[in-house]
Amino acid sequence: MKKSAKLWMVILFLFTGAGRVTAQIPSTRIYDGKKLAKVKARMESKEYASAITKLMNEADKALKSKPVSVMDKTMVAGSGDKHDYVSMGPYWWPDPTKPDGLPYIRKDGVRNPNATSDCTNIGKTINDISTLGIAYYFSSNEVLHKVFNHI
């Protein structure tokens, strides 16, 4: 009699989902928290393991990369202060008919390889922060936690 009662308890436990491992649903503006929690609950499955490995490798790279600065550029803003943000349209070129090339002229569809801006650096920073945040959610790695407490 005791064995059948235990068996029914186990069956009830399994069918009600009480034994199911669930992940905390994160509050995020970038990703769907419910989907992240579902993936975390199954992250070691064959379906997700390679993606999680790739994510952790990207997080390791982000941890090792040098923080970017507005000073990491050769072009100076029009103000003459290297500390100021620079954003130059990719389709604008120096005017070849003017000695100083100013004002720039637009060549639609032709990218200027010298058109640099701080956009590249800020994009890298945003990507690294996003990668480190999602990697922390999946790994609970304390190194990543410390990084986020300093951002």
Image (cartoon, grey):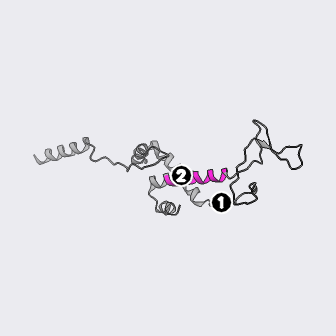
As drawn, the residue found furthest toward the top would be 108
Neighbourhood count class around disc 1 (C-alpha, 10 Å): few under 14, some 14–19, many 20 upward: few
Image: 69 above or below 50: below
Eyeballing the image, is 92 above or below 142? above
Which residue is disc 1 drawn over?
69
131 in the magenta segment: yes
Look at 14% across and 44% down and name the residue there. 4
Magenta residues span: 119-133
| Amino acid residing under circle 2 | Thr
Residue 81: percent from the left, percent from the top?
Answer: 73, 60
Number of numbered discs overlaid on the protein picture = 2
Q: Which mark is residue 131?
A: 2
- Residue 43 or residue 84, whichever sits in front: 84
How packed mark 2 is, by other alpha carbons closer than 10 Å (few <14, some 14-19, many 20 or more), is many
Q: Position of residue 41 (x, y in %)?
A: 39, 47
Query: Tag 1: residue type?
Result: Ser
The quadrant in which residue 65 appears is bottom right
Residue occupying image coordinates x 62% and y 50%:
123
Regarding mark 1 in the picture, which secondary structure is present there? loop
Q: Nearer the viewer, residue 46 or 135?
A: 135
In depth, the one of 54 and 137 nearer the eye is 137
In this picture, residue 144 sits left or right of residue 104: left
Camera-side mark, 1 or 2: 1
**What residue lies at 42% left-to-right and 48% top-to-bottom?**
40
Alpha carbon distance from label 1 to label 2:
19 Å
Q: Quadrant of residue 110?
A: top right
